[in-house]
Image (cartoon, helix red, strand yellow):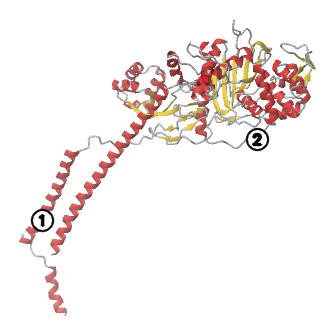
Amino acid sequence: MLRIINLTLMLSMLVGVFALYAIKYDARQLEARVQTQERDLEKLENNVAVLIAERAHLARPKALEPLARGLGLAPIAPRQYLRLEPSSAANVIE
Amino acid sequence: MRLLRASARPKCLLRAPIVATASTRRRTLLTLAALVACFAAIAAQLLRLGVKAEPDFHLNIAEPIGQSWSRPDIVDRHGQLLATDVATHSLYADPQLVLDSDEVLEKLTGALAGLDRAEVRRALADRGRRFAWIARGLTPRQAQSVHDLGLPGLAFRTELKRVYPLGALAGHVVGSVNVDNKGLVGLERWLDDMGKVEAVQGTDRSAKPALRLSLDVGVQHAVSEELQAAVTRYSATGAAGLVLDLTSGEILAAASLPSADPTRPSDWLELSHADKLMSGSFELGSVFKTLTVAMALEAGVADLNSLYDVRRPLTIGANTITDLHPSGRPLSVREVFLHSSNVGAGLIALDLGADRQRQFLAKFGLIEPLRTEAGSIAPPQLPKHWGRIETVTVSYGHGIAVAPLQLAAAMAGVIVGTKVTPTFLARAEASAPAARVVAPATSARIQEILRLNVTSPVGTGRKADAEGYRVGGKTGTAEMPGRGGYQAKAVISSFIGAFPMDAPNYLTLVLLFEPEPVAGIAPGITAGLNAAPTTARIVHRIAPVLGVLPRLIGRAEPTDGPFDAPSAAQ
């Protein structure tokens, strides 16, 4: 009876050792995956930062103004403002 | 009992000869089975590893060298990006692993334009070192070209680099950083001083919220462009411009030309690129007469109709004060302002006296150094002895030199009647009402004469009238000091104004350094001929951006041609 118990315990220990090793190895694998994903995330964040900076660079007023001028646009001139008065027939658009 | 014990002892101590019994065989088999199981387990695990091995397993190595700083973004009041951190590649060498330093140097020079050969040669020659920077902040293309060379002993680190998407726009305000991303000047330096930057290794971007400035990129661009056009038009050596929100003290635009590029920290070392709004103090001339008149009104020494005899030059000791265009009759305070009479301003100041003049200027912060988030402002240069002649010269802006931003803050206080503290940061919420510095009646009279100076046929600021936007302001033409005294042909011309004058919201300041006459446009170099029209162009462009509505209804006639502002027509 004692031998059976010893044998069982020894087998359990072996299984436990193997299971522990497997879990530890899996944990390391997962850790490595997390690190890889963190690095990928950082890379993506940096790419996003570059894209935002590039968008700001492309949308800078100095770049847009010549394009706007080329299209015939200009700052709003005072004469472009109209006061809409209900009593004024001149401002009724038909 | 003893006999029994004696007979039992030898039986226990006896060792039976080792004979392979059935029991022993079973034990041996069990042990072997256990060993086989262990080896089988190891083999199974190895097999599993062989089949399921992760191809992208990386090993992290600590990188103790090359600490950098991550900084929060800087944005304008509407969120437009002005400065941010991006990850870039930096090239370094391990001199002990470099096989042929001449070959490395030759190939690197071909791949990286502008590389300092002497510096790299020195770095590679030091075999005792294991780390030496070669080039930092490379573009992806440059990094790839160096990588493609396949040179042993060279490697890359990624680190943060500050970039400025809008280039030199508002460069003086934003400031600059060094190669380690540490703030050197401007608001970049302020970020460091306030502990808003973090030491990092690698490319961890800052998680802190962006620094929101009071600047409006659209207004800043319009001011910069118009100043640049004015520099070209009047052949000036430099210019500066400012737009200030009178209610909050927020600076919406602050430009100084020649500009400073944040990517070139060396710009801050060149005197010609110095920020003319903050880092220099100048005698700004007749714009000071606004303060002199406000002083007299506030003290009750005179009102706008009080008369002063300006027919003769004002003589104090060995000094004689004259007017550019002497008047043949006494002038009221209002006319002294409109004609910009030095003699009249001097007489008003003499009525007040040196002590009251100094106290009044102190109330507006013109005696003490001013400081903003973008750095210290050049301290005012005051008369060493504040006697009668100094009282007179200070009344029309000579003998006292202040930073233009400091004068603008004082002028803002006179116009709205309360203390205005200029700031480059967007205010999160409306601040508590500021302390009153002059009576409402005084600021109302000042607003009246500032507007009159633009609308009156005799006003010096007539050309500042931006149609529809009710501009008011005061001109100033100050001769620059040089060898042997003041130079008559080298002046700083300025215009400090506000709009719309029926309810002033914004203050504008334009400075032109050493403008020259232009045939057909500006026959002289006085501010009314150059700084005033430049202000009009600026107001025409920024008023629509700021939501100020023109008052032209009933007079404006639409035309068939394309709409255009006066600035575009120049």
Of the 4 image quadrants, the one containing the N terminus of chain B is: bottom left
Q: Give the residue drawn at x 16%, y 79%.
A: B13
Disc 2/disc 1 C-alpha distance (Å): 96 Å
- Image coordinates of residue B308 in percent, x first then y, are 91, 22
For the residue labelled by badge 2, is the local secondary structure a helix, a strand or a loop? loop
Residue annotated with mark 1: B30
Question: Which label's residue is closer to the chain start, 2 or 1?
Answer: 1
Q: Is residue B77 above or below residue B240?
A: below
Q: Is residue B87 above or below residue B323?
A: below
Residue annotated with mark 2: B435
Residue B154 badge: none
Amino acid type, mark 2: Ala
- Image coordinates of residue A50 in percent, x first then y, are 44, 31
- Image coordinates of residue B106 in percent, x first then y, are 40, 19
Residue that protrudes farthest toward the top in the picture: B519
- Image coordinates of residue B402 in percent, x first then y, are 75, 27
| Left or right: B96 as drawn, with respect to B268 | left
